[in-house]
Image (cartoon, grey):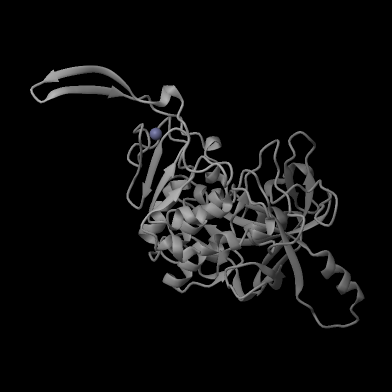
Protein backbone atom coordinates (compact mmCIF):
# COMPACT_ATOMS: atom_id res chain seq x y z
CA UNK A 1 0.00 0.00 0.00
CA UNK A 2 2.83 2.42 0.75
CA UNK A 3 3.88 2.39 -2.91
CA UNK A 4 0.37 3.32 -4.01
CA UNK A 5 0.33 6.47 -1.89
CA UNK A 6 3.98 7.28 -2.63
CA UNK A 7 3.37 7.16 -6.40
CA UNK A 8 -0.09 8.73 -6.43
CA UNK A 9 -0.55 11.94 -8.40
CA UNK A 10 -2.97 13.17 -5.77
CA UNK A 11 -4.65 11.62 -2.73
CA UNK A 12 -8.18 12.64 -1.80
CA UNK A 13 -8.73 12.52 1.93
CA UNK A 14 -12.14 12.37 3.59
CA UNK A 15 -10.57 14.17 6.54
CA UNK A 16 -13.79 15.06 8.37
CA UNK A 17 -15.48 11.66 7.96
CA UNK A 18 -15.94 9.65 11.13
CA UNK A 19 -16.30 6.41 9.20
CA UNK A 20 -16.30 4.97 5.70
CA UNK A 21 -19.98 5.84 5.16
CA UNK A 22 -19.70 9.63 5.72
CA UNK A 23 -18.16 10.32 2.32
CA UNK A 24 -16.13 13.33 1.19
CA UNK A 25 -18.62 16.17 1.33
CA UNK A 26 -19.75 18.07 4.38
CA UNK A 27 -21.95 21.16 4.73
CA UNK A 28 -20.03 24.12 6.09
CA UNK A 29 -21.60 26.17 8.87
CA UNK A 30 -23.01 29.53 7.62
CA UNK A 31 -20.33 31.54 9.44
CA UNK A 32 -17.65 29.73 7.45
CA UNK A 33 -19.12 30.47 4.05
CA UNK A 34 -17.79 33.61 2.36
CA UNK A 35 -20.03 36.63 1.98
CA UNK A 36 -20.07 39.70 -0.22
CA UNK A 37 -18.81 42.85 1.49
CA UNK A 38 -19.51 45.24 -1.38
CA UNK A 39 -19.83 45.46 -5.13
CA UNK A 40 -17.83 47.80 -7.31
CA UNK A 41 -19.03 48.71 -10.73
CA UNK A 42 -16.18 49.28 -13.11
CA UNK A 43 -15.58 49.32 -16.83
CA UNK A 44 -15.39 45.56 -16.97
CA UNK A 45 -18.64 45.14 -15.06
CA UNK A 46 -19.35 44.38 -11.45
CA UNK A 47 -16.60 43.23 -9.10
CA UNK A 48 -17.30 41.90 -5.64
CA UNK A 49 -15.22 42.09 -2.52
CA UNK A 50 -15.84 38.88 -0.61
CA UNK A 51 -14.71 37.99 2.89
CA UNK A 52 -14.38 34.81 4.90
CA UNK A 53 -13.45 34.59 8.56
CA UNK A 54 -10.55 32.30 9.53
CA UNK A 55 -11.51 28.89 10.86
CA UNK A 56 -10.29 27.08 13.89
CA UNK A 57 -9.02 23.92 12.17
CA UNK A 58 -10.05 21.63 14.92
CA UNK A 59 -8.43 18.21 14.91
CA UNK A 60 -11.47 16.77 16.68
CA UNK A 61 -13.58 17.65 13.63
CA UNK A 62 -11.20 15.83 11.30
CA UNK A 63 -11.38 12.23 12.39
CA UNK A 64 -9.05 10.81 9.78
CA UNK A 65 -6.21 12.90 11.18
CA UNK A 66 -6.12 10.87 14.38
CA UNK A 67 -6.23 7.45 12.72
CA UNK A 68 -2.88 5.69 12.90
CA UNK A 69 -3.29 3.87 9.59
CA UNK A 70 -3.92 7.15 7.76
CA UNK A 71 -0.72 8.72 9.14
CA UNK A 72 1.74 7.19 6.72
CA UNK A 73 -0.68 7.68 3.85
CA UNK A 74 -0.57 11.39 4.61
CA UNK A 75 3.21 11.45 4.95
CA UNK A 76 3.89 9.41 1.82
CA UNK A 77 1.40 11.09 -0.55
CA UNK A 78 3.10 13.78 -2.63
CA UNK A 79 -0.13 15.84 -2.75
CA UNK A 80 -3.33 15.61 -0.73
CA UNK A 81 -6.66 17.37 -1.02
CA UNK A 82 -8.38 17.07 2.35
CA UNK A 83 -12.15 17.38 2.45
CA UNK A 84 -12.48 19.14 5.79
CA UNK A 85 -15.50 19.85 7.95
CA UNK A 86 -15.87 23.41 6.64
CA UNK A 87 -13.47 23.74 3.71
CA UNK A 88 -10.93 22.11 1.44
CA UNK A 89 -7.31 21.91 2.58
CA UNK A 90 -4.32 21.33 0.32
CA UNK A 91 -1.07 19.74 1.42
CA UNK A 92 1.96 19.03 -0.73
CA UNK A 93 5.71 18.81 -0.37
CA UNK A 94 6.05 22.57 -0.53
CA UNK A 95 3.10 24.11 1.24
CA UNK A 96 -0.20 23.79 2.98
CA UNK A 97 -3.16 26.01 2.10
CA UNK A 98 -6.86 26.25 2.83
CA UNK A 99 -9.87 28.24 1.74
CA UNK A 100 -9.88 30.55 4.76
CA UNK A 101 -6.15 31.25 4.21
CA UNK A 102 -5.20 30.68 7.83
CA UNK A 103 -3.16 27.59 7.07
CA UNK A 104 0.21 28.11 5.54
CA UNK A 105 3.57 26.75 6.44
CA UNK A 106 4.89 30.32 6.12
CA UNK A 107 2.47 31.70 8.70
CA UNK A 108 3.19 29.36 11.60
CA UNK A 109 2.59 29.65 14.43
CA UNK A 110 -0.89 31.08 14.13
CA UNK A 111 -3.85 30.99 16.42
CA UNK A 112 -5.93 29.10 13.90
CA UNK A 113 -3.35 26.53 13.04
CA UNK A 114 -4.20 23.48 15.04
CA UNK A 115 -4.72 21.52 11.89
CA UNK A 116 -1.34 20.08 10.84
CA UNK A 117 -0.65 18.72 14.33
CA UNK A 118 2.44 17.13 12.89
CA UNK A 119 5.62 17.98 14.66
CA UNK A 120 7.86 20.34 12.71
CA UNK A 121 5.91 19.78 9.52
CA UNK A 122 7.08 16.25 9.16
CA UNK A 123 5.59 15.98 5.68
CA UNK A 124 7.92 18.63 4.34
CA UNK A 125 10.90 17.16 6.10
CA UNK A 126 10.14 13.64 5.09
CA UNK A 127 9.82 14.38 1.42
CA UNK A 128 12.78 16.74 1.29
CA UNK A 129 15.18 14.79 3.44
CA UNK A 130 14.34 11.16 3.26
CA UNK A 131 17.80 10.29 2.09
CA UNK A 132 19.61 13.11 3.87
CA UNK A 133 21.54 13.13 7.12
CA UNK A 134 18.54 14.41 9.07
CA UNK A 135 16.55 11.25 8.55
CA UNK A 136 17.05 10.05 12.14
CA UNK A 137 15.35 13.19 13.40
CA UNK A 138 12.62 12.95 10.76
CA UNK A 139 11.85 9.40 11.89
CA UNK A 140 11.74 10.39 15.56
CA UNK A 141 9.36 13.27 14.76
CA UNK A 142 7.17 10.86 12.81
CA UNK A 143 7.12 8.48 15.79
CA UNK A 144 6.13 11.35 18.13
CA UNK A 145 3.18 12.26 15.94
CA UNK A 146 2.19 8.71 15.12
CA UNK A 147 2.24 7.51 18.73
CA UNK A 148 -0.65 9.87 19.64
CA UNK A 149 -2.93 8.32 17.06
CA UNK A 150 -5.50 5.64 17.60
CA UNK A 151 -5.46 2.05 16.45
CA UNK A 152 -8.36 -0.39 16.50
CA UNK A 153 -5.93 -3.27 16.96
CA UNK A 154 -2.92 -2.49 19.20
CA UNK A 155 -0.92 -5.18 17.40
CA UNK A 156 -0.94 -3.00 14.26
CA UNK A 157 1.45 -0.50 15.85
CA UNK A 158 4.48 -1.47 13.74
CA UNK A 159 2.64 -2.53 10.54
CA UNK A 160 0.74 0.79 10.33
CA UNK A 161 3.98 2.79 10.10
CA UNK A 162 5.94 0.23 8.09
CA UNK A 163 5.43 2.14 4.83
CA UNK A 164 7.57 5.02 6.10
CA UNK A 165 10.13 2.60 7.54
CA UNK A 166 10.42 0.84 4.18
CA UNK A 167 10.98 4.14 2.37
CA UNK A 168 13.80 5.03 4.76
CA UNK A 169 15.29 1.58 4.55
CA UNK A 170 15.18 1.67 0.74
CA UNK A 171 16.86 5.05 0.40
CA UNK A 172 19.40 4.83 3.21
CA UNK A 173 20.11 1.10 3.71
CA UNK A 174 19.63 1.56 7.43
CA UNK A 175 18.80 -1.44 9.60
CA UNK A 176 15.40 -1.42 11.26
CA UNK A 177 14.60 -3.06 14.57
CA UNK A 178 11.08 -2.93 15.98
CA UNK A 179 10.57 0.80 15.43
CA UNK A 180 14.20 1.90 15.90
CA UNK A 181 17.21 2.21 13.60
CA UNK A 182 20.51 0.59 14.48
CA UNK A 183 22.45 3.47 12.89
CA UNK A 184 20.83 6.02 15.20
CA UNK A 185 20.27 3.71 18.16
CA UNK A 186 21.63 5.97 20.95
CA UNK A 187 19.21 8.75 20.00
CA UNK A 188 16.35 6.41 19.10
CA UNK A 189 16.53 4.78 22.54
CA UNK A 190 15.89 8.15 24.21
CA UNK A 191 12.13 8.17 23.71
CA UNK A 192 10.05 8.99 26.75
CA UNK A 193 6.40 9.09 27.63
CA UNK A 194 4.78 12.44 28.29
CA UNK A 195 3.41 12.17 31.79
CA UNK A 196 0.18 14.00 32.52
CA UNK A 197 -1.73 13.88 35.76
CA UNK A 198 -4.73 12.07 34.37
CA UNK A 199 -3.26 9.83 31.73
CA UNK A 200 -0.29 7.63 32.33
CA UNK A 201 0.82 5.26 29.63
CA UNK A 202 0.34 1.52 29.92
CA UNK A 203 1.68 -1.65 28.45
CA UNK A 204 -0.62 -3.15 25.79
CA UNK A 205 -2.72 -6.11 26.99
CA UNK A 206 -0.81 -8.40 24.65
CA UNK A 207 2.95 -8.15 24.02
CA UNK A 208 3.68 -6.28 20.79
CA UNK A 209 7.25 -4.95 20.96
CA UNK A 210 10.44 -5.27 23.03
CA UNK A 211 10.60 -2.81 25.93
CA UNK A 212 13.40 -0.74 24.38
CA UNK A 213 10.97 0.18 21.61
CA UNK A 214 8.45 3.03 21.87
CA UNK A 215 5.93 0.53 20.46
CA UNK A 216 5.93 -1.27 23.83
CA UNK A 217 3.70 1.39 25.42
CA UNK A 218 0.28 2.88 24.74
CA UNK A 219 0.14 6.56 25.58
CA UNK A 220 -2.64 9.00 24.77
CA UNK A 221 -0.19 11.88 24.80
CA UNK A 222 2.32 9.95 22.72
CA UNK A 223 6.02 9.36 23.08
CA UNK A 224 8.50 12.14 22.82
CA UNK A 225 12.22 12.75 22.44
CA UNK A 226 12.09 15.81 24.66
CA UNK A 227 15.27 14.97 26.55
CA UNK A 228 17.19 15.00 23.30
CA UNK A 229 15.51 18.25 22.34
CA UNK A 230 16.42 19.86 25.64
CA UNK A 231 19.95 18.67 25.11
CA UNK A 232 20.00 20.40 21.74
CA UNK A 233 20.40 17.08 19.97
CA UNK A 234 17.32 17.03 17.79
CA UNK A 235 18.84 19.28 15.19
CA UNK A 236 21.16 16.56 13.99
CA UNK A 237 20.93 12.92 13.27
CA UNK A 238 23.05 10.58 15.32
CA UNK A 239 25.41 9.65 12.56
CA UNK A 240 26.37 13.15 11.42
CA UNK A 241 27.11 16.27 13.44
CA UNK A 242 25.65 14.88 16.62
CA UNK A 243 28.62 12.59 17.14
CA UNK A 244 30.73 15.71 17.57
CA UNK A 245 28.56 16.75 20.47
CA UNK A 246 27.46 13.60 22.21
CA UNK A 247 29.28 10.56 23.46
CA UNK A 248 27.82 7.11 23.25
CA UNK A 249 28.36 5.06 26.41
CA UNK A 250 27.67 1.55 25.22
CA UNK A 251 28.82 -0.88 22.61
CA UNK A 252 26.22 -2.75 20.61
CA UNK A 253 27.29 -6.38 20.27
CA UNK A 254 24.24 -7.80 18.58
CA UNK A 255 20.61 -6.99 17.90
CA UNK A 256 17.75 -8.93 16.42
CA UNK A 257 14.06 -9.67 16.28
CA UNK A 258 11.84 -12.54 15.21
CA UNK A 259 9.42 -11.33 12.58
CA UNK A 260 5.78 -12.36 12.61
CA UNK A 261 5.69 -12.41 8.81
CA UNK A 262 7.91 -11.72 5.82
CA UNK A 263 7.96 -7.94 6.25
CA UNK A 264 11.16 -6.78 8.02
CA UNK A 265 9.38 -3.58 9.07
CA UNK A 266 6.23 -5.34 10.24
CA UNK A 267 5.02 -7.04 13.40
CA UNK A 268 7.57 -8.78 15.63
CA UNK A 269 7.30 -11.73 17.99
CA UNK A 270 10.37 -10.83 20.05
CA UNK A 271 13.42 -8.60 19.91
CA UNK A 272 16.65 -8.00 21.81
CA UNK A 273 19.70 -5.83 22.16
CA UNK A 274 22.97 -7.33 23.41
CA UNK A 275 25.23 -4.60 24.70
CA UNK A 276 28.31 -3.85 26.73
CA UNK A 277 27.60 -0.97 29.06
CA UNK A 278 27.75 0.51 32.55
CA UNK A 279 24.94 0.01 35.05
CA UNK A 280 24.29 1.80 38.33
CA UNK A 281 22.18 -0.11 40.83
CA UNK A 282 19.28 1.77 42.33
CA UNK A 283 15.84 1.45 43.82
CA UNK A 284 12.49 2.77 42.70
CA UNK A 285 10.66 5.02 45.05
CA UNK A 286 7.05 5.74 44.21
CA UNK A 287 5.88 9.19 45.24
CA UNK A 288 2.43 9.47 46.80
CA UNK A 289 -0.62 10.38 44.77
CA UNK A 290 -1.71 12.71 43.25
CA UNK A 291 1.73 13.47 41.84
CA UNK A 292 2.32 9.94 40.69
CA UNK A 293 5.93 10.71 39.96
CA UNK A 294 8.66 8.15 40.40
CA UNK A 295 12.12 8.58 41.70
CA UNK A 296 15.13 6.42 41.33
CA UNK A 297 16.75 6.34 44.69
CA UNK A 298 20.25 5.02 44.89
CA UNK A 299 20.65 2.19 47.32
CA UNK A 300 22.03 3.19 50.69
CA UNK A 301 21.14 6.83 50.21
CA UNK A 302 18.33 8.62 51.92
CA UNK A 303 15.16 9.80 50.19
CA UNK A 304 16.42 13.28 49.59
CA UNK A 305 18.88 11.99 47.06
CA UNK A 306 16.26 10.49 44.80
CA UNK A 307 16.29 11.48 41.15
CA UNK A 308 12.98 12.00 39.41
CA UNK A 309 12.58 10.21 36.11
CA UNK A 310 10.07 9.44 33.38
CA UNK A 311 8.35 6.09 33.92
CA UNK A 312 7.43 4.32 30.67
CA UNK A 313 4.00 3.32 32.00
CA UNK A 314 1.79 3.26 35.08
CA UNK A 315 3.57 1.01 37.58
CA UNK A 316 0.52 0.87 39.85
CA UNK A 317 -1.39 -1.45 37.55
CA UNK A 318 -1.31 -4.95 39.01
CA UNK A 319 0.08 -7.79 36.93
CA UNK A 320 3.36 -8.72 35.33
CA UNK A 321 4.41 -5.10 34.69
CA UNK A 322 3.75 -3.89 38.23
CA UNK A 323 6.65 -2.10 39.91
CA UNK A 324 6.74 -1.79 43.67
CA UNK A 325 8.39 0.93 45.71
CA UNK A 326 11.75 -0.49 46.74
CA UNK A 327 12.19 -2.70 43.66
CA UNK A 328 15.73 -2.92 42.33
CA UNK A 329 16.46 -1.12 39.07
CA UNK A 330 19.59 -0.48 37.01
CA UNK A 331 20.46 2.80 35.34
CA UNK A 332 22.03 2.19 31.94
CA UNK A 333 24.03 5.14 30.63
CA UNK A 334 23.17 5.69 26.97
CA UNK A 335 24.79 8.97 26.03
CA UNK A 336 26.27 12.12 27.50
CA UNK A 337 26.92 15.66 26.43
CA UNK A 338 29.95 17.68 27.48
CA UNK A 339 29.51 20.86 29.50
CA UNK A 340 29.01 24.02 27.48
CA UNK A 341 31.14 26.66 29.18
CA UNK A 342 29.91 29.44 26.86
CA UNK A 343 26.30 28.82 27.85
CA UNK A 344 27.22 28.14 31.49
CA UNK A 345 25.58 24.75 31.11
CA UNK A 346 26.74 21.63 32.89
CA UNK A 347 27.07 18.47 30.87
CA UNK A 348 24.32 15.92 31.12
CA UNK A 349 23.63 12.28 30.48
CA UNK A 350 20.63 10.19 29.53
CA UNK A 351 20.01 6.79 31.09
CA UNK A 352 17.48 4.05 30.57
CA UNK A 353 15.99 2.69 33.77
CA UNK A 354 16.00 -1.11 33.56
CA UNK A 355 14.92 -3.96 35.75
CA UNK A 356 15.69 -7.66 35.59
CA UNK A 357 13.04 -9.65 33.76
CA UNK A 358 11.04 -11.92 36.02
CA UNK A 359 11.64 -14.96 33.78
CA UNK A 360 15.37 -14.37 33.85
CA UNK A 361 15.50 -14.13 37.64
CA UNK A 362 13.62 -17.40 37.95
CA UNK A 363 15.82 -19.29 35.48
CA UNK A 364 18.94 -17.98 37.24
CA UNK A 365 17.78 -19.38 40.55
CA UNK A 366 17.14 -22.74 38.91
CA UNK A 367 20.42 -22.89 36.99
CA UNK A 368 23.14 -25.03 38.54
CA UNK A 369 26.22 -23.71 36.81
CA UNK A 370 29.26 -21.56 37.58
CA UNK A 371 29.19 -19.93 34.18
CA UNK A 372 28.42 -16.23 34.19
CA UNK A 373 25.22 -15.93 32.21
CA UNK A 374 24.22 -12.75 30.40
CA UNK A 375 21.44 -11.21 32.43
CA UNK A 376 18.26 -10.06 30.77
CA UNK A 377 16.62 -6.73 31.50
CA UNK A 378 13.56 -4.81 30.44
CA UNK A 379 13.25 -1.08 30.11
CA UNK A 380 10.83 0.72 32.45
CA UNK A 381 11.84 4.38 32.26
CA UNK A 382 14.08 7.19 31.08
CA UNK A 383 16.31 9.32 33.30
CA UNK A 384 18.18 12.54 32.69
CA UNK A 385 21.24 13.24 34.76
CA UNK A 386 21.28 17.02 34.67
CA UNK A 387 24.80 17.29 35.92
CA UNK A 388 26.62 14.64 33.96
CA UNK A 389 28.41 12.46 36.47
CA UNK A 390 26.08 13.44 39.27
CA UNK A 391 24.47 10.02 39.34
CA UNK A 392 27.89 8.39 39.41
CA UNK A 393 29.26 10.60 42.14
CA UNK A 394 26.14 10.05 44.24
CA UNK A 395 26.44 6.32 43.67
CA UNK A 396 30.10 6.32 44.64
CA UNK A 397 29.44 8.37 47.76
CA UNK A 398 26.64 6.03 48.72
CA UNK A 399 28.76 2.95 48.14
CA UNK A 400 26.29 1.77 45.52
CA UNK A 401 27.28 -0.95 43.08
CA UNK A 402 28.41 0.32 39.70
CA UNK A 403 28.75 -2.45 37.15
CA UNK A 404 31.25 -1.37 34.52
CA UNK A 405 31.79 -3.08 31.17
CA UNK A 406 29.02 -5.55 31.80
CA UNK A 407 27.29 -7.41 28.94
CA UNK A 408 23.52 -7.31 29.17
CA UNK A 409 20.54 -8.24 27.09
CA UNK A 410 17.49 -5.95 26.85
CA UNK A 411 14.24 -7.48 25.65
ZN1 LIG B 1 -8.66 27.33 6.68
Q: Is residue 139 left or right of residue 254?
A: left
- Give 261 or 175, whichever is nearer the viewer: 261
- Give 72 or 221, whichever is nearer the viewer: 72
Picture residue at 78% right of the left edge, 40% below the top: 287
Instruction: Name the quadrant containing residue 126.
Output: bottom left
Instruction: Name the quadrant containing residue 177.
Output: bottom right
Task: Please state the quadrant of the image where ligand 1 appears.
Answer: top left
Picture residue at 61% right of the left edge, 47% below the top: 222
From this view, report whether residue 188 is shown above or below residue 372. Answer: above
Quadrant of the drawing holding the C terminus: bottom right
Q: Is residue 280 left or right of residue 20?
A: right
Farthest left residue in view: 43
From this view, report whether residue 402 is shown above or below residue 101. Answer: below
Tell me residue 116's x, y (percent): 45, 42
Q: Is residue 120 left or right of residue 221?
A: left
Q: Taking the image as drawn, is residue 234 in sight?
A: no
- Give 316 or 265, whichever is nearer the viewer: 265
Q: Taking the image as drawn, is residue 138 in sight?
A: yes
Tell me residue 133's x, y (percent): 40, 64
Picture residue at 78% right of the left edge, 48% below the top: 315
Tell me residue 184's x, y (percent): 51, 65
Tell me residue 302's x, y (percent): 79, 45
From this view, report whether residue 343 is shown above or below residue 185. Answer: above
Amino acid sequence: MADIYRNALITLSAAWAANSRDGLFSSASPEHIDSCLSSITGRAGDDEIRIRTPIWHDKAEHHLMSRAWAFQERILSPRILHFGRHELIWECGKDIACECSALSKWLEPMRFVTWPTLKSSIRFNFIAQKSGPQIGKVWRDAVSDYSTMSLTFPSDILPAISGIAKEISKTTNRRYLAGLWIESLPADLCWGVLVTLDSLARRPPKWRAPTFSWASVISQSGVDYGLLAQSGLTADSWDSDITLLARQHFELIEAGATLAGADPTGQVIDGYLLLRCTLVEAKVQVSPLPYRGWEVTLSATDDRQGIWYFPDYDYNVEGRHHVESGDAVYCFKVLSLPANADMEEAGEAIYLVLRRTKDDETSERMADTDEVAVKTYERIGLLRDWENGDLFSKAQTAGTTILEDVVIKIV
